[in-house]
Image: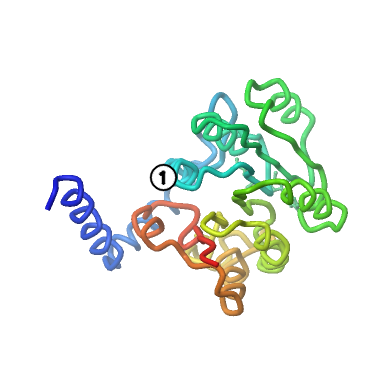
Amino acid sequence: MDPISQFNAERAADIAAMASDKELHQKSIDWMLHADKYKYTYNYTWMGRPIIKFPSDIVATQQIVWDVKPDLIIETGIAHGGSLILSASLLEMIGGDGKVLGIDIDIREHNRKEIESHPMIKRISMIEGSSTAPEVIEQVQAIASKAKRVMVFLDSLHSHEHVFNELQLYAPLVTVGSYLVLPDTFIEYFPKGYYSHNRPWDVGNNPMTAMRAFLENNDDFEIDKDLCNKLMITEAFDGYLRRVK
Ligand SMILES: C[S@@+](CC[C@H](N)C(=O)[O-])C[C@H]1O[C@@H](n2cnc3c(N)ncnc32)[C@H](O)[C@@H]1O
């Protein structure tokens, strides 16, 4: 076997073994829960803007963008803008004129100002409104209809109902071979009641449950197990869906 194939084969074997290691999975959840005491995912920036992600998910995003080379990345949930700027910088890295479209129900003035004065704004446009509102979807569809390779992140309101509705509206925009990413599926593995005191999501009501319901009646998408199985510490357990047809 040539050295590259040998490296790839060894890596695939390690990932497969890791995926069946239930103890490591539980340790990862325990670590995430412990680190959440310090709002771990809020502690990073990307090109100067706060990004609410685990580093492993940032690397996973880089892998997808490099492989798929999307010319449009749609993201629901902007917050401070770090993830929009990450996507825009990855499009800059691969070259071409790829663009990022962000949607948020509430783009805070201070965040808008920082995003609009960032060098990556040349690739970014934003819509303020609910990600499932008909007038928003109309604009998103018009923009997506001009793109060849579309990738989508659904990172807004993490309740089952909202994510399920987003899946119906945004999944058809993803092009074959590209990805639909569902952050915050980890809620399903956190203790029941951990979020429900101040958030409309919980165990049994989150992006993981919405994704399972969606996949029951949709075989256009598959969980990219090769990618998901290696992340371990991730906001998107089984949340990287590849459009296969
Ligand atoms: C988890 S944050 C997004 C984090 C960002 N993608 C990142 O990685 O840095 C969630 C965002 O979703 C927005 N949001 C909540 N409900 C929404 C809705 N119905 N439509 C669009 N955005 C919504 C919130 O205002 C908030 O900014």
Instruction: Indicate yes or no: mark 1 CB to ligand 1 under 8 Å.
Output: no
Residue at 22% of width from left, 57% of height from top? 14
In the visual, does 76 lie left or right of 109? Answer: left
Residue 37 image offset from top left, x and y in percent? 49, 46
- Which colouring convention does the figure follow? rainbow
Name the image quarter holding the C terminus: bottom right
Q: Kindly indicate the quadrant of the structure image that contains residue 124.
A: top right
Mark 1 neighbour class, 10 Å CA radius: few under 14, some 14 to 19, many 20 or more:
some
Residue at 54% of width from left, 38% of height from top? 42
Q: Residue furthest left?
A: 1
Q: Kindly indicate the quadrant of the structure image that contains residue 169.
A: bottom right
Residue 159 image offset from top left, x and y in percent? 67, 63
Residue 179 image offset from top left, x and y in percent? 54, 55
Q: Is residue 87 above or below residue 136?
A: above
In the visual, does 53 lie left or right of 21? Answer: right
In the visual, does 48 lie left or right of 8? Answer: right
The answer to which of 244 and 211 lies nearer the viewer is: 244
Q: Residue furthest right?
A: 135
Q: Is residue 38 above or below residue 34?
A: above
Q: Residue furthest bottom?
A: 217
Residue at 34% of width from left, 62% of height from top? 25
Q: Is residue 189 above or below residue 120?
A: below
Residue at 20% of width from left, 56% of height from top? 9
In the visual, does 14 lie left or right of 78? Answer: left
Task: Tell me the amino acid under the disc marked 1.
Answer: Ser
Q: How many marks?
A: 1
Residue of label 1: 56
Name the element at disc 1: helix
Residue 32 image offset from top left, x and y in percent? 43, 52
